[in-house]
Image (tube, helix red, strand yellow):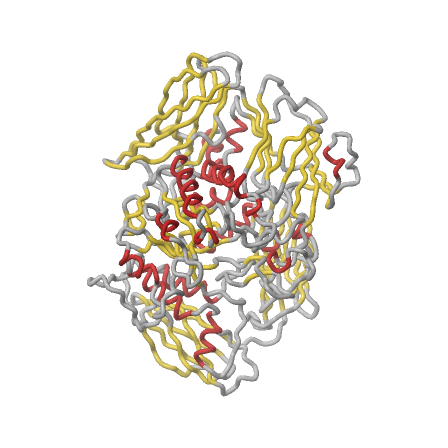
């Protein structure tokens, strides 16, 4: 039984363990809510009649359910989605209610301006939509007929530069403890040292005594459990705790022969922390733990367990495409798996804290996370954004992020802001200092940065006093190649002036663009730029520099995945800057980065070869590859063998660094290209790598004739956290995907519910909650969810095409 519980914990967080605890009872509070869109001031009263309201479960995002509106107050900032005010109410009983216990309600995130009432009594307000928070319910709760009411106000727009979603869009839980319990988020560990095949863990925790009498002897026991549930180390200490007081205890634990957490091997343990009084358990909490050391060296960059690791990073916003901001865990898991496959090892949470389960997935999959708090401080970017609440709430919101996330081994860096105008203000240095101090007080192991876009700006540059606050931390550069006339990366200029400065590219140009769309003209240089959709030469030169110079910690491109919002024209509800579209389908740029980030044999050609009307015209064919050589053939005719000129080490972790320490800009590209006169048929690339041959083929497909339907998994859990992703491909009669197909596909589903449909086409404003979707450049996606065991049958149908059926088991 212990082994089973441990494995469940690794994949679902702390809930399962906590439910087995005698002293701490955590109840999932996601189900059985009532919801109404609009403002109902009397809904805070217990006696309010909500019988006509909609029944649903949270996480819930009402904005994604509504039709895009050109006149929506948030405009293109949030993808032309409506927002407004909404109310949630939950009527519930408390099993085995005990008035001597302590009860609290925990929300992982509500966007935004949430206000809560329990049984008609006001609990409080939380403006920031990304913070996790809780309220003490003790003294207000009763055994039966409790009513929790939540008002969510996202009506004042614009309040964001990207899609936020609206509502209780993350998980909720009810927590029951004894009056003598651990303070929330107070259990904290870090790896103090690793040497002689053993590790020393520093562990601390704060005990709260809400009793009227002192407790003379409280034992705090921390035990380290492996993935089999075996106890591999423990430490115990005793402290007295006065009445109505909080006491902190710090301990050290020695772990023999630890399995270290790393990007390649993300080994995890569970830390079980228990409070004992006279041998009886008073509280018990569990935390995911990874044993690892981190260091930011001024010359060697980032060191993980003493080994240099280059951060190959992407920025990510928090929406999950067609599911909006209420993202089931499996949606993020699949997205992260695809990123990992392409060599990505680092994520910046742009520009706000993510849901707790996001970090758990990063722990399990081996990602390095830059955890970011804010997009703005005092000086805002939109009329109704966080600037209005910053002075009153920013330290509380920053504390919520740092204390909540500091136990995750994946989190290796804090970021306190992104492109804040306060870089140039007189208040900026003091604001930065206070937030850096808060981070350091809560966590002495990680350094702090911010994404700065004014380091060398022509107007209102960042002040020297502001940058000085980060000199002992990490200076983050947004788009570091834009300030120098020679397109030289500006942090190299700064490194010469400030040799002790640690630097990272917090945000930089990626290779995004619309998946499968190619804008062919007559100028080969323009065609090439259009293919890559992101200044490809600049991207290549920046990554040569990043991999060449050890001191550069890494680079986070904008972005990893397309997202809703930041659409500056109608009709479009999102930004196509990712190298994955918002279905998770791979764009060409994905293969470019895979070719330089991994040693997995990569061979990818573009554009597609259905270029009707281009017969005889010269088409630049681009190849992203890490093969030693590639030869291109069109209908059997060779267009020559080519070689990449830029040298790199075999493990691809660090390219050869010039011994003279000077900036070297190679003229060698990180891609290959051929000018080919177009004719329909078969385009073939044959690559050689380490003595093996690899092939990539593009063919001119015929007319759409059939559907191919596939699922990312054959078996899913009958649980709202899990989903199956169904990919539709439009094929010709010979089974070739038609890269220009836009057929309307209808989904007939038995045994499950469609919770999202998408195609990656941001200009298609049809509902992501419908049961049909037009394919875009040959592809579309349906996400299904089941809450009951059984066989799920899905049929994909399109007029004039052979349909497809797939069965999935829910268990």
Q: Nearer the viewer, residue 347 or 480?
A: 480
- Residue 72, percent from left and from top: 68, 57
Q: Residue furthest bottom?
A: 616
Residue 172 position within the rendered picture, expressed as x and y whole percent measured from the top left: 60, 36
Along the horizontal axis of the image, is 298 left or right of 384? left
Above-or-below relation of 162 to 775: above
Q: Residue at x 23, y 35 (%)?
A: 196
Residue 762 falls left or right of residue 433: right
Identify which residue is drawn at 30% across, 29% down: 254
Viewer-proximal residue, 741 or 552? 552
Who's the residue at 44% across and 16% down the image? 241
Q: Give the quarter of the image for residue 718.
A: top right
User: Where residue 158 sits in the image (x, y, percent)?
Assistant: 62, 54
The reply to whether residue 590 is visible in this rendering is yes
Is 516 above or below relative to 503? below
Q: Quadrant of residue 756?
A: bottom right
Looking at the image, is 120 positioned above or below residue 501? Answer: above
Residue 582, quarter of the rendered image: bottom right
The C terminus: image quadrant: top right
Residue at position x 72%, y 39% in the image: 34
Q: Give the x, y percent position of residue 522.
A: 49, 84
Foreground pick, 60 / 12? 60
């Amino acid at each position: 039984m212990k082994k089973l519980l441990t494995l469940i914990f690794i994949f679902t967080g702390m809930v399962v363990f906590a439910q087995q605890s005698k002293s701490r009872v955590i109840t999932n509070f996601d189900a059985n809510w009532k919801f109404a869109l609009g403002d109902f001031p009397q809904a805070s009263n217990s006696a309010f009649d909500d019988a006509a309201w909609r029944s649903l479960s949270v996480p819930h995002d009402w904005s994604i359910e509504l039709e895009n509106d050109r006149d929506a107050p948030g405009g293109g900032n949030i993808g032309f989605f409506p927002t407004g005010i909404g109310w949630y109410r939950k009527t519930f009983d408390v099993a085995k209610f005990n008035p001597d216990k302590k009860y609290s309600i925990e929300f992982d995130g509500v966007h935004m301006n949430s206000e809560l009432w329990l049984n008609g009594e006001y609990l409080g307000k939380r403006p920031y939509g990304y913070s996790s928070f809780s309220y003490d319910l003790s003294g207000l709760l009763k055994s039966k007929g409790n009513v929790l009411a939540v008002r969510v106000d996202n009506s004042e727009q614009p309040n964001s530069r990207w899609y936020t979603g609206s509502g209780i869009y993350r998980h909720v839980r009810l927590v029951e403890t004894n009056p003598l319990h651990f303070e929330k988020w107070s259990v904290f560990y870090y790896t103090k040292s690793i040497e002689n095949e053993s590790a020393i863990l520093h562990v601390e925790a704060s005990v709260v005594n809400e009793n009227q009498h002192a407790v003379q002897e409280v034992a705090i026991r921390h035990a380290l459990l492996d993935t089999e549930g075996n106890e591999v180390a423990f430490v115990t200490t005793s402290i007295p705790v006065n009445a109505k007081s909080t006491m902190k205890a710090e301990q050290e634990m020695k772990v023999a022969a630890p399995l270290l957490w790393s990007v390649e091997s993300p080994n995890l343990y569970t830390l079980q922390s228990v409070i004992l009084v006279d041998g009886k358990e008073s509280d018990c909490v569990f935390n995911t733990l990874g044993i690892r050391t981190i260091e930011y060296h001024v010359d060697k960059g980032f060191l993980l367990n003493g080994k240099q690791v280059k951060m190959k990073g992407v920025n990510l916003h928090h929406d999950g495409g067609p599911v909006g901001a209420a993202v089931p865990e499996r949606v993020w898991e699949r997205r992260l798996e695809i990123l990992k496959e392409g060599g990505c090892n680092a994520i910046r949470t742009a520009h706000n804290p993510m849901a707790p389960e996001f970090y758990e997935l990063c722990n399990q999959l081996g990602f390095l996370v830059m955890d970011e708090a804010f997009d703005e401080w005092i000086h805002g970017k939109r009329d109704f954004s966080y600037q209005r609440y910053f002075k009153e709430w920013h330290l509380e919101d920053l504390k919520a992020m740092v204390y909540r996330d500091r136990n995750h081994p994946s989190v290796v860096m804090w970021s306190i802001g992104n492109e804040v105008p306060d870089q140039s203000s007189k208040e900026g240095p003091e604001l930065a200092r206070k937030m850096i101090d808060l981070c350091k007080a809560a966590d002495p192991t990680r350094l702090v940065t911010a994404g700065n876009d004014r380091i060398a700006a022509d107007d209102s540059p960042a002040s020297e006093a502001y940058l000085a606050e980060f000199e002992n931390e990490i200076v983050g550069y947004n788009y570091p190649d834009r300030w120098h006339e020679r397109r030289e990366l500006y942090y190299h200029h700064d490194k010469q002036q400030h040799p002790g400065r640690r630097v990272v590219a917090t945000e930089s140009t990626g290779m995004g663009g619309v998946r499968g769309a190619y804008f062919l003209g007559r100028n080969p240089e323009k065609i090439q730029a259009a293919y890559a959709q992101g200044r490809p030469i600049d991207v290549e030169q920046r990554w040569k520099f990043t991999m060449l110079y050890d001191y550069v910690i890494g680079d986070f491109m904008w972005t990893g995945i397309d997202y809703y919002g930041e659409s500056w024209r109608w009709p479009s509800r999102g930004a196509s800057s990712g190298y994955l579209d918002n279905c998770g389908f791979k764009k060409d740029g994905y293969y470019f980065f895979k070719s330089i980030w991994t040693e997995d044999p990569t061979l990818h050609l573009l554009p597609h070869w259905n270029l009707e009307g281009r017969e005889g015209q010269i088409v630049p064919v681009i190849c992203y590859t890490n093969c030693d050589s590639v030869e291109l053939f069109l209908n059997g005719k060779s267009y020559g063998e080519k070689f990449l000129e830029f040298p790199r080490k075999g493990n691809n972790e660090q390219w050869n660094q010039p011994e003279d320490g000077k900036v070297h800009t190679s003229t060698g590209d990180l891609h290959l290209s051929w000018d080919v006169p177009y004719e329909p048929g078969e385009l073939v690339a044959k690559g050689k790598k380490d003595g093996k041959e690899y092939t990539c083929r593009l063919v001119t497909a015929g007319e759409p004739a059939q559907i191919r339907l596939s699922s990312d998994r054959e078996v899913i859990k009958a649980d709202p956290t899990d989903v199956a992703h169904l990919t539709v491909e439009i094929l010709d009669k010979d089974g070739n995907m038609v890269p220009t197909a836009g057929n309307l596909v209808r989904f007939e589903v038995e045994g499950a519910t469609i919770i999202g449909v998408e195609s990656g086409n941001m200009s298609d404003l049809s509902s992501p909650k419908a049961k049909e979707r037009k394919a875009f450049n040959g592809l579309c996606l349906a996400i299904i969810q089941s809450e009951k065991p059984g066989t799920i049958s899905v049929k994909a149908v399109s007029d004039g095409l052979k349909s497809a059926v797939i069965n999935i088991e829910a268990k």
